[in-house]
Image (cartoon, helix red, strand yellow):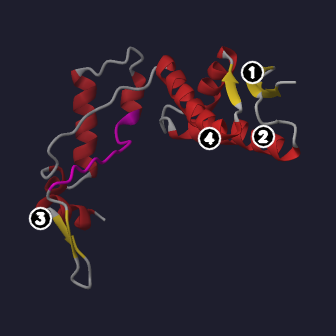
């Protein structure tokens, strides 16, 4: 894999075994890694101090070959997400689901308790926001789809998602 990335970063193009070439000269390549994330998660203030930055870059140098790192224009360290930022991501995913329900004129409402529960139960600081989406699919989308199929959620209705007794509850309007 690294040889392919080296070819792409060095030459700005890739050539397959049949001689076909893809031009990447006007392409921005964004790569992500969790290397050093435990160090970044240790800092609860959200700032990245110089010592932490040095330790993360030491881990990068230990993991990647110098010829690979030399071809990267910039390396950006991201601070861990705050709970408010996680709740914002929950709201974004909820808006996306609402947009899919709009053709049936179904309004989706998440209570503050539901947003907080999803943010706490579905977020993993090590893996970022990806588990949130899977959590919402499993805890909201799948049960809601079953309610739609069973006819308990009707078109032109409102569905409220709330958190009660350590779980999410989906309530269609009467």
What numbered label is drawn on residue 104?
none
* Magenta region includes residue 11: no
Q: From mark 4 to mark 1, how far is it between C-alphas?
A: 22 Å
Q: Residues within 10 Å of mark 2 (few under 14, many from 20)?
A: some
Which range of residues does the magenta coloring cover?
26-37
Residue at point 35% right, 26% down? 79
Q: Is residue 108 above or below residue 33?
A: above
Which residue corresponds to mark 2? Answer: 143
Q: Is residue 123 above or below residue 59?
A: above
Q: Is residue 143 above or below residue 115?
A: below
Q: Mainly helix, strand or loop, the magenta region? A: loop
Which residue corresponds to mark 4? Answer: 100
Q: Nearer the viewer, residue 85 or 111?
A: 111
Position of the N terminus, as image quadrant, is bottom left
N-terminal-most mark, 3 or 4? 3
Which residue corresponds to mark 1? Answer: 163
Secondary structure state at the residue bearing disc 2:
helix
* 5 sits to left or right of 96: left
Marks 2 and 4: CB-CB under 8 Å? Answer: no
Q: From mark 2 to mark 4, how far is it between C-alphas?
A: 15 Å
Q: How many marks?
A: 4
Which residue corresponds to mark 3? Answer: 11
Q: From mark 1 to mark 3, how far is it between C-alphas?
A: 53 Å
Position of the C terminus, as image quadrant, is top right
Q: Residues within 10 Å of mark 1 (few under 14, many from 20)?
A: some
Q: Is residue 87 above or below residue 155?
A: above
Give the quadrant of residue 50: top left
Marks 2 and 1: CB-CB under 8 Å? Answer: no
Q: From mark 2 to mark 1, how far is it between C-alphas?
A: 14 Å
Secondary structure state at the residue bearing disc 3:
helix
Q: Position of residue 85 (x, y in %)?
A: 47, 22
């Amino acid at each position: 894999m690294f040889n392919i990335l080296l070819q792409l970063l060095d030459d700005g193009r890739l050539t397959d075994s049949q001689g076909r070439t893809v031009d990447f000269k006007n392409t921005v390549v964004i790569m992500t890694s969790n290397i050093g994330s435990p160090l970044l998660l240790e800092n609860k203030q959200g700032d990245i101090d110089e010592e932490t930055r040095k330790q993360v870059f030491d881990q990068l140098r230990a993991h990647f070959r110098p010829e690979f790192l030399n071809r990267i224009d910039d390396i950006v360290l991201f601070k861990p997400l705050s709970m408010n930022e996680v709740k914002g991501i929950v709201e974004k995913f909820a808006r996306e689901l609402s947009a899919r329900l709009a053709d049936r004129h179904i309004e989706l409402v998440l209570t503050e308790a539901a947003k907080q529960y999803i943010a706490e139960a579905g977020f993993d600081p090590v893996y970022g926001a990806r588990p949130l989406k899977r959590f919402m699919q499993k805890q909201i989308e799948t049960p809601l789809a079953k309610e739609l199929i069973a006819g308990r959620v009707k078109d032109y209705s409102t569905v409220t998602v709330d958190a009660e007794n350590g779980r999410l509850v989906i309530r269609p309007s009467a």
